[in-house]
Image (tube, grey):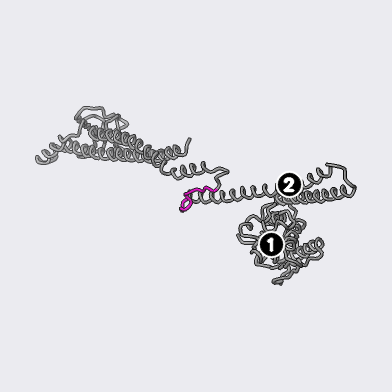
C-alpha cells in the first residue's frame, strides 16, 4: 500500500473513532437525561394522583378542585394504580400493563419508592400514608415525544457520521497528497541522478524541516560519491599509465633484442634494463598490496603503546639509510612535562611506513642538498608531526588529488615516484583514528602534518 493511502486511512480512522465516541457520548447522555427527567414527571403525576384520590375527603372544595384539574393534565398513555396495604387495587386509571406483582409492591413498601421500565413504559412507585393507612401508588407513562426525538437524534448522528466520513476521506486524500508533495519532488529529482549526473543536487535542502534535513544529508552523500567517482577515475587513469610505462619499455627492449643476433654485452644491457623495469613493477605491486592492507577492518590490526618521538626517530633512520646523503632535522616544538602524553596506540610497522613515506617525500622534492625539517608538537589531545620541504610545491588544482593512488602533479612527473606514498599514509592514519593534512605553495614548498590521538587521553564527544 502506498504511503498516501496509508496516511489517508490513518487520518480517516482516527477521525472516525473520535466521531463515533462523540456520537455515542451525546446519544447516551441525552437518553439518560430524558429518562431521568421523565421519571421525575411521572413521580409528580403519582403525587397528584394520590392527593386527588386519597385526600379528596380531607381537603376543601378549592383544593379538591385544584387537585382534579392537575390530575386531568395527563401524560401521554398515562396509567395510575393505587393499592392498599393488603395488596388490593383501590384505584385504577388509564390502560396499560404496569408489570405489578406482589414482590414489586413489597419492595416499594420497603424502599419507599422505586423506578423501573416495563417495555417502553416507565413506571414510578411510591409509598403514601393517609390517615394512618399505607398505600402504594404507581404511575406510568410512555415518553413518546422524547423517544421520537431520541430516534431522530440517532438518525442525525448516523447520517452526520457517514457524511463526515465522506468529507474526511476526500480531505485526507488531498491532505496526504499535499503532505507527500515534497517527497514526490525528491523522488523525481533522485530518479534523474545517475553515475554520469552526480553533479545534480536535491533542491529542498534550504529549509528547517525533516525533509530538508534529509535532502541535505543526501546532497552530502552525493558530494562524497562524486568525489569517490572522480578519485576512482583518476586512480584508473594514473595506475594504467604507471603500469603501462615499464611494461611497454620491457616489451620494446625485448622485441628489439630479438630482431637479430646481438653481442653478449647488448644482451646483458637488455636484461639489466628489463630487470630494472621488473623491479619497478614489483615496487608498484608492493605499493598496491600495502594500500589494500591499510584498508582492512581496523579491528583486525594489532595495536600496542608506542612513543611517538621514538617512532619518528626510527623512521628518520630508515629514510637516511635509503638516502645517505640527505639530511633530516627533527626538533620538539614543546616537550611535555608528562612523557605519557607522547604515547600513542597503534601498529608499529604500519605507522613506521606512514612516517617514512612522508619523510622520503620531503627529501625527494627538496632542492639540492636534500634537507627536510620535522617538528614534533604535543597538543591538547593529539601528538603532531610537521614535515616541511622547500621544493617545487603543489598547484591548488592538484592538491585535492594528492591522496589518490598513482596521482602525480604535473610539475613533478620528471621526478622518480609512483604516487603511492601519501595515499598509503592517509589510509594507515585513518586506521589509527589519526589524520593527515597537506599545505603547499608553488615554488615555496610543502608542509605535511600528521596527527595521532594520545593514548592516555579521551577526546570529548
Residue where numbered disc 1 is placed: 450
- Residue at 63% in and 60% down: 395
The dot on residue 393 is: none
Cβ–Cβ below 8 Å for labels 1 and 2? no
> Does residue 377 lie above or below 93 as drawn?
below
Magenta segment's dominant SS is: loop
**Magenta span of residues:** 199-209
Horizontally, residue 285 falls left or right of residue 167, namely right
Q: Quadrant of residue 48?
A: top left
Foreground disc of the pair 1, 2: 2
Q: Residue furthest front?
A: 260
Measuring from the top left, give residue 373's x and y in whole percent: 72, 68
Crowd around label 2: few <14 · some 14–19 · many ≥20 (10 Å): few
Q: Residue 95 vs residue 313: left or right?
A: left
Q: Is residue 41 among what the camera can see?
A: yes
Looking at the image, is 178 positioned above or below residue 304?
A: above
Foreground residue, 165 or 113? 165
Q: CA distance from mark 1 to mark 2?
A: 32 Å
Q: Can residue 388 be seen by looking at this rendering? A: no
Residue placed most toward the observer, 315 or 53: 315
* Residue toward you, 101 or 322: 322
In which quadrant is the C terminus drawn?
bottom right
Where does residue 215 sit, x and y in percent of width and height?
Answer: 50, 49
Which comes sooner in the sequence, label 1 or label 2? Answer: 2
**Residue hosting label 2:** 244
Query: At x 55% / y 51%, what residue is drawn?
Result: 220
Check the image and name the residue furthest to the right. 264
Amino acid at each position: 500500500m502506498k504511503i498516501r493511502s496509508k496516511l489517508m486511512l490513518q487520518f480517516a480512522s482516527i477521525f472516525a473513532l473520535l466521531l463515533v465516541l462523540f456520537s455515542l457520548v451525546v446519544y447516551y447522555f441525552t437518553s439518560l437525561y430524558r429518562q431521568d427527567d421523565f421519571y421525575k414527571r411521572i413521580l409528580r403525576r403519582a403525587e397528584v394522583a394520590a392527593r386527588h384520590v386519597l385526600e379528596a375527603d380531607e381537603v376543601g372544595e378549592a383544593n379538591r378542585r385544584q387537585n382534579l384539574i392537575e390530575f386531568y393534565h395527563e401524560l401521554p398513555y398515562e396509567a395510575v394504580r393505587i393499592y392498599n396495604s393488603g395488596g388490593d387495587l383501590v384505584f385504577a386509571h388509564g390502560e396499560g400493563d404496569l408489570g405489578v406483582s406482589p414482590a414489586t409492591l413489597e419492595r416499594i413498601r420497603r424502599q419507599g419508592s422505586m423506578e423501573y421500565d416495563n417495555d417502553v413504559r416507565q413506571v414510578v412507585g411510591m409509598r403514601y400514608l393517609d390517615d394512618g393507612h399505607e398505600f402504594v401508588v404507581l404511575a406510568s407513562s410512555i415518553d413518546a415525544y422524547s423517544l421520537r426525538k431520541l430516534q431522530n437524534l440517532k438518525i442525525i448522528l448516523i447520517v452526520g457520521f457517514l457524511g463526515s466520513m465522506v468529507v474526511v476521506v476526500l480531505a485526507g486524500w488531498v491532505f496526504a497528497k499535499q503532505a507527500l508533495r515534497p517527497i514526490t519532488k525528491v523522488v523525481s529529482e533522485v530518479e534523474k541522478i545517475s553515475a554520469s549526473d552526480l553533479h545534480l543536487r536535491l533542491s529542498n535542502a534550504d529549509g528547517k524541516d525533516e525533509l530538508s534535513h534529509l535532502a541535505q544529508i543526501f546532497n552530502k552523500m552525493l558530494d562524497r560519491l562524486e568525489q569517490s567517482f572522480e578519485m576512482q577515475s583518476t586512480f584508473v587513469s594514473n595506475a594504467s599509465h604507471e603500469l603501462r610505462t615499464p611494461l611497454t619499455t620491457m616489451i620494446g627492449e625485448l622485441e628489439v633484442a630479438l630482431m637479430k643476433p646481438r653481442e653478449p654485452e647488448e644482451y646483458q644491457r637488455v636484461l639489466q634494463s628489463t630487470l630494472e623495469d621488473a623491479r619497478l613493477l614489483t615496487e608498484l605491486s608492493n605499493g598496491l598490496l600495502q594500500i589494500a592492507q591499510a584498508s582492512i577492518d581496523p579491528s583486525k590490526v594489532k595495536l600496542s603503546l608506542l612513543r611517538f618521538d621514538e617512532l619518528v626517530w626510527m623512521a628518520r633512520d630508515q629514510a637516511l639509510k635509503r638516502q645517505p646523503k640527505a639530511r633530516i632535522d627533527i626538533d620538539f616544538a614543546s616537550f611535555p612535562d608528562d612523557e605519557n602524553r607522547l604515547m600513542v596506540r597503534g601498529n608499529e610497522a604500519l605507522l613506521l611506513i606512514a612516517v617514512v613515506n612522508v619523510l622520503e617525500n620531503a627529501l625527494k622534492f627538496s632542492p639540492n642538498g636534500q634537507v627536510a625539517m620535522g617538528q614534533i608538537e604535543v597538543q591538547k589531545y593529539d601528538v603532531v608531526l610537521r614535515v616541511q620541504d622547500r621544493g617545487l610545491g603543489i598547484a591548488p588544482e592538484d592538491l585535492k588529488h594528492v591522496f589518490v593512488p598513482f596521482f602525480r602533479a604535473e610539475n613533478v612527473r620528471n621526478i622518480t615516484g609512483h604516487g603511492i606514498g601519501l595515499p598509503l599514509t592517509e589510509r594507515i592514519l585513518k586506521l589509527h583514528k589519526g589524520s593527515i593534512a597537506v599545505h603547499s605553495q608553488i615554488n615555496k614548498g610543502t608542509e605535511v602534518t600528521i596527527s595521532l590521538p594520545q593514548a592516555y587521553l579521551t577526546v570529548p564527544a
